Image (cartoon, rainbow, N blue to C red):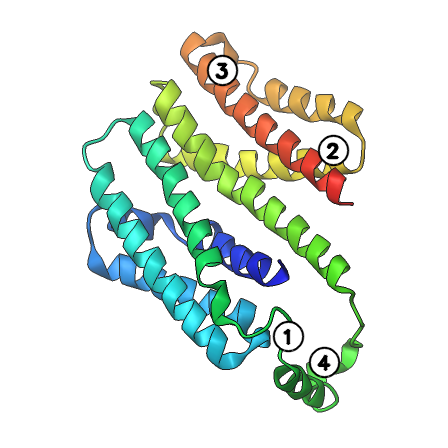
Amino acid sequence: MSLFLLALCAHLVGDFLFQTESTVAAKNAGRLWAHLVHGLLITVLTWLATHCFGLGAAFCYALLVGLAHLLIDSAKSFLEKGRSAGTKLFLFLIDQGFHWLSLLVFLPLFPAPHPDPGVLAFYRSLWPTVPVFSFFRPVSVSPLSLEKGLWIIALYLAAVFGGAVFTNRILAWLTDNHQGEKYRRLSSAIGIMERLILITLVVADAISAIGFVLAAKSLARYQELNNREFAEYYLVGTLTSFTLALFAGLWLRTLL
C-alpha cells in the first residue's frame, strides 16, 4: 500500500500543484507539446517517489504510468471539445479514476513491496558525507506509521489542491456566474486556504472554530452577497469546498 500511496502523491503533485494553467489551456487546445511535457513531469515525479523500491522497476513503472497518463489526458481533451460543463465535470472524474487505476495496474512490476536494500544502503552512505544531511538524523519508521503519513499527505493534496479543480468544475456546471480571471484565481486561492484550515480543524476536533472561518469569509464578501447571482455562486463554491474538507478531515480522523 505504501508503494501505491507514494505513486498517488506523485500523481497529485504533478496534476494539481505543478501543472500550470497555461499548460492546461494548451492541452485543451490540442497542443502535443503540452501533453508531452506533462507526461514527462508525471514520469519523473513517479520515478522519484518510487525509486527506493528498485531503480529498474521504478523506471519501467514510471514510464508506463507516464505513457498511460499521456493517453488518458489526450482522450479527455479530445472528448471535452464542445461539451457542456456537466459533461466536462463527468470526464474529469473519469479521468482521475483511470489515472488512479493505472497506478494500481502497473504495481506488479516491482519484485517486492518493500524498499530495495541496495538503494537504502546508497542513501545511508551519503548521510555522513553530504553537509546538508548532517543537520538530520535517520530515524526508523514502522511500515504502518509510514502508510498513515502517506495517507495524510495524499488526502490533503487531493482535498486541498484537487478540490480547487473540482470546485471550479462544479461552479461551471451549476452556475452561470463567470468571474474575471483575476477574481477567479483569487477565489481559488481562498478556497485552497479554506480547505487547508477546515481539514486541520476537523482533525484537531475543533469543530466549533469552523463557524468562525466561514463567518470571516462571508463578512469579507458581505457587500457582494446582495447580488443574487453572486450569492448563488458563492454558496455553491463554499458548500462544495466545505463538503470536501469535512469528508477529508473525518477520513483522516479515522486514520489517526
Residue at the spot x=64%, y=71% of the render? 114
Q: Secondary structure at mark 1?
A: loop
Q: Amino acid at mark 1?
A: Pro
Residue at the spot x=46%, y=13% of the render? 232
Question: Does 69 appear above or below 51?
Answer: above
- In the rendered image, is residue 183 in sight? no
Q: Are marks 4 and 3 in contact (CB under 8 Å)?
A: no
In the rendered image, which residue does mark 3 sit on?
224
Nearer the observer, 26 or 219: 26
Total numbered labels placed on residues in the image: 4
In the rendered image, which residue does mark 2 sit on?
202
Question: Which label sits in the foreground, 4 or 3?
Answer: 4
Q: Amino acid at mark 2?
A: Val
Residue at the spot x=44%, y=69% of the render? 61
Tell which circle, 2 or 1, labels the residue nearer the N-terminal end.
1
Circle on res. 133: 4
Q: Measured from the top left, where is residue 219 in percent x and y?
A: 62, 18
Viewport quadrant of the N terminus: bottom right
Tell which circle, 3 or 1, labels the residue nearer the N-terminal end.
1
- In the rendered image, is residue 30 in sight? yes
Q: Secondary structure at mark 4?
A: helix
Q: Are marks 2 and 4 in contact (CB under 8 Å)?
A: no
Distance from label 3 to label 1 (Cα)? 54 Å
In the displayed structure image, the side of residue 84 where residue 190 appears, left or right: right
Question: Does 239 appear above or below 161?
Answer: above
Label 1 Cα neighbours within 10 Å, binned few <14 / some 14-19 / many ≥20: some
Distance from label 4 to label 3 (Cα)? 51 Å
Q: Secondary structure at mark 3?
A: helix
Circle on res. 115: 1
Q: Are marks 4 and 1 in contact (CB under 8 Å)?
A: no
In the displayed structure image, the side of residue 155 where residue 184 appears, left or right: left
Q: Amino acid at mark 3?
A: Glu
